[in-house]
Amino acid sequence: MTELDRWVLSQSERFLEELKTLLRIPSVSTDPKHAGDCRKAADWVADHLRKLGCRDVQLLASDTHPIVWGVGPDVPGAPTVLIYGHYDVQPPDPVNEWTSPPFEPVVRNGDLFARGSTDDKGQVFAAIKAFEAICQGGKPPVNVRFMIEGQEESGSRLLFDLLNKEPERVAADAVLVSDTSYFAPGWPAVETGLRGLCYTEIEVRTSKTDLHSGLYGGAVPNAHDALVQILGKLKTPDGKIRVPGLYEAVKRPSAEERKAWKKLPFSEARFLRDEVKAKALTGLKPYSVLERTWALPTLEIHGIMGGFTGEGAKTVIPAVATAKVSLRLVPNQKEKTVQKQFLKAVKAAAPKYADVKVRFLHGADPVLVDISSRPFQHIDRAFREVEGRGVVPTRSGGSIPVVPALGKKGAPVILAGIGLPDDRLHAPDEKINVEQFYKGIRAFARFLTYMGDG
Ligand code: BES
Ligand code: MN
Ligand code: MN
């Protein structure tokens, strides 16, 4: 144990209480009703950075979902680390499936339960506390900047616009992103790739108004019928996406990378039984589950709306039906290209009598990360010291839209999160393991220190 570890330990209860305060703010970015709460979370983070000695703390780009910017004490001649994270969270629904209310954080059996506990408040707060730790005893060894946004869960539009106008914000020697997971307990990971996203809404209209299903049924079009015809044509039962051209840009991971994945402690049977809890896995059988979730595109239906879904029975032929559908993209695919391909495929699959509109809600380009530069040695060393094991290179099937933009000035982007695979992010009973939170603080503090040494 170093002095730093002892200090973190001595402050651990305060750190946890502070995190709980942030977790009590329901900063759901996708829901306009929570705009005020997003602002509250931003103010809280900004005040916190000020208290820790940051200068130039600002709320950028918006009154309701601002980007929190802050700069640590000036350390002339030392490298600069940019810390990125997000204070916004996913909606807590279905709320009654939570064991305790989503915005009343509570520790049970070493886990802290709350919406945002692992995604991403707990994780970004661990990086903030690491900064506090390296500021003990005077000046920190490295220049630190914070960029903590409030729209990650809804597409990061404001941050994209800001970085287009002010690209220098991401000029740094490394960017640290703590918004991902360990590969398994005891196995810290650094992501070498993230999938992209193309999130869409398909609206089908087949008549001016709803129609009586007895008087008209048998002779008139039904919007839900048209919609399921379209959806049914977009994917084969074994999981191949039928969007012409979609697989053309897909670059298969190298044989070497796939071989490394085979050595990871992963069992498809255990994954099915303990994590997925379904009767079977689906998808393209010739590929491993890791390749299917990390390196192949997907098309998923998230919800179908319209027609009659209330209590009881109503005999109606719906005029309008809507589906939310998204595609995950993999390295070398481009969101813009996929939008065009998808639009074409949907139009081609639609019956002649249906008017079809496709809206693109938000998205992200996929990323591949080259982990050969020096900062990755520092993160590896930091986790090796704290965890007894260095970081394993993995990929993730998830997306963080702004990651490609974070690297635009040449800084290596380090995706090294402290979540665990069973954290249930976006789902009821989201949690962060309290020990992970403390280990994260200790590992990130080491990383920042080693970055200062060059
Ligand atoms: N932090 C997650 C992404 C993630 C989680 C990556 C675990 C790797 C491991 C992020 O907050 C997230 O949920 N992203 C969204 C995208 C967004 C545009 C809605 C996603 O992946 O669905
Ligand atoms: Mn996140
Ligand atoms: Mn998320």
Image (cartoon, grey):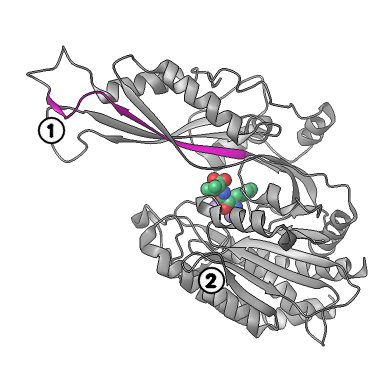
Instruction: Give the residue at x 76% y 71%.
Output: 144
Asked if residue 421 can be seen in this view, the reply is no
Q: Residue at x 51, y 28 (%)?
A: 280
Quarter of the displayed picture in which ligand 2 can be seen: bottom right
Label 1, label 2: how many angstroms apart (C-alpha)? Answer: 46 Å
- What main secondary structure does the magenta stretch of the protein show? strand
Q: Quadrant of the N terminus?
A: bottom right
User: Element under label 2?
Assistant: helix
Beta carbon at label 1 within 8 Å of ligand 1: no
Question: Does the magenta portion include 286?
Answer: no
Q: Viewed as shown, does residue 317 lie left or right of 79?
A: left
Q: Which mark is residue 42?
A: 2
Q: Residues within 10 Å of mark 1 (few under 14, many from 20)?
A: few
Instruction: Identify residue for label 1.
Output: 313
Q: Position of residue 351 (x, y in %)?
A: 34, 15
Q: Disc 1 marks which amino acid?
A: Ala
Residue 299 sits above or below residue 26 on the image = above
* Three-letter amino acid code of the residue under disc 2: Ala
Residue 374 image offset from top left, x and y in percent: 90, 55
Residue 285 percent across, percent down from the top left? 62, 20
Give the residues in magenta. Answer: 196-212
In which image quadrant can residue 13 be found? bottom right
